[in-house]
Amino acid sequence: MELARRVKEKRPRRKRNFGQWFEDIGSTYVMILPTFIMFIILTLYPMFWVFRFMFYEYDGVSKAVFVGFDNFVRMFTRDQAWWSSVLITFKVAFLKLIIEIPLAMLTAVLLNKKEIKGKGLFRGIYFLPTVTSAAVMSVVFSFVLSPYNGILNSLLLKFGIIHESVDFLSNGTSALVTCAVISVWQIFGQNTLLILSGLQGIPEDVYESAQVDGANRLQCFLKITVPLIMPTLRIILMLAIIGSLGIFDTIFVLTGGGPSGETSVMAIHIYQRLFGEGVPEYGYSACLSFISSVISGIITVFYLAVSKKSADVY
Amino acid sequence: MEHKKRRRRINPFEFGLNTVIYLILIIVGIITLFPVVYSLLGAFKSTQELMTSGSILPKQYTLDNYKYVLDKIDFSRYAFNSLFVSVMAVLTSTLMATTTAYTFSRRNFVGKKLIKTMYLATMFIGAGAATMYPTYKLLVDLGINKNYLGLIFLNCGAPVPIILLCESYLKGISKDFDDAAKIDGCSFFRIYAQIIMPMLMPMVAVNALLTFRGVWNSYLMPMIVTAGQPKLQLLTVAIVELKTGGGLATMWSTILAAVNISLIPIIIVYVLCNKQFIRGIAEGGLKG
């Protein structure tokens, strides 16, 4: 023991030449630094920029002025448009989640059934939209949904489901629902995949022994599948919540935040203050942006706390 | 004999249930495929036909739309831009993620814990959408917003989930390989290049696919960076611009041809590498 420690202590002292130092220590940093430097530049720097400039008034031309908490005061007291965009974000996220998660759960459970053939094919088809670009597919959707000559309207008319063409993006509510449905289309396959791989991880003999004990299918599902899939579902739901709150591409291409700001989610609201028409408000946008991530942070933490409690019940 | 017996045992309830299940799966499948098929087939139609006919299959196949977007409005260039930037991003992110994962798994050094914590933390902590501006401003200040460097620079980071994935994969590879090579006189770098990299190939493939998908499909930052510089635009940006920018906005089937130039390559990659994609999502998604 003593000997081993002495040998360890001695070794670095014996060789002091550069080559050895480089091989033992220098090389570590050569390997680690490029990634770390890019991390500082692309991730940390923009974050700290936001943390700093949320206390400033800055339009990109004149000098940035330190205004303390004025931006926050303005946001909390006078900025109706911002809070309505927060509300819109919640609405879209909620709509998206209540369609996406049950759909993913349903498809995954059905695909997990032993007798079903062509599992790989179905899974492959459901996952396909996730490899396409949300922005590009939104262009396609704008044609499909178009009130004039759009194929969806003409199909619905043909089958007599509607009697005159519908403009899905004409008013706030239906535009929100449409955007939510499209982003569900885009992403649900990923969740199907994740839930399915969770389901496949449940050992077969658990079900067999339950059946021996006389459990029926519903009982098996509620008492075995659901509790065992819960940990997976928890993470999936958390990722889905974070993803939904940051929704941008689909809505930006389809409606651009319109009609009259009714689909302007937080990210679009901030984008327009930064790059839209009018004088850019970099400082104020930084403040809004910070608050938006605080909001999603709070929701995530709240969700984790609640879901932990429900996980304890099972 | 055995076979017959089993077949008789399927009861009507089971049969009905399976039919319903197939029906649901197929309906969801059709809805999922519809927009993609609509786009792929629509580009073969004339705009006239695309708008008026209720049928999804073209009556007459024409390649005029493709010819138009490739020759007249320079989509070959946008396709090249997208491909070039995506491939560069794949190369840099592969290099960065694997070097970091290798060092994390094989060495202890001052600051390792701190760096790791920072990487992990930024997966959950962000500063929201306003980070677009400092990132863009940085490219302007560095003077690389008007050439490819800027677009490549944007995607030069290592995705943290991939670092974690590679690291946990490397932890499963015995250090005996390293030690044996070290005794034979291999340096830290040579072990990385000649021993670790070949073994990391499955993870490299996963990273390549996910990064390629991400950059090929990315829209927001490329749009901001290439605003006013049509020659640098990526496919995604150029397609949205076609639709919103007037001019061709009414020529649907032409725009669909442009859409397909973006869709077809990624779909081919997906079909060929289906397994790696699914592996990447199933492992990366939950571990992160």
Image: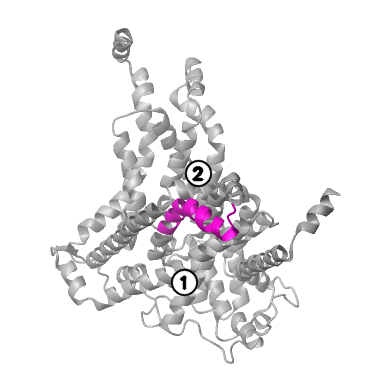
Say the numbered circle drawn on residue B91.
Answer: 2
Report the amino acid beneath label 1.
Answer: Ala
User: Would residue A278 be found to the left or right of residue A131 on screen?
Assistant: left
Q: Secondary structure at mark 1?
A: helix
Q: Position of residue A46 (x, y in %)?
A: 30, 54
Compared with B262, A256 (above or below) is: below
Magenta highlight on residue A227: yes
Compared with B256, A31 (above or below) is: above
Which region of the structure is painted magenta?
A: A214-238
Q: Position of residue A129 (x, y in %)?
A: 57, 62
Determine whether label 2 and label 1 are within 8 Å by CB: no
Residue linked to disc 1: A180
In front: B288, or A53?
Answer: B288
Compared with A309, B56 (above or below) is: below
Q: Position of residue B70 (x, y in %)?
A: 62, 66
Report the amino acid beneath label 2.
Answer: Leu
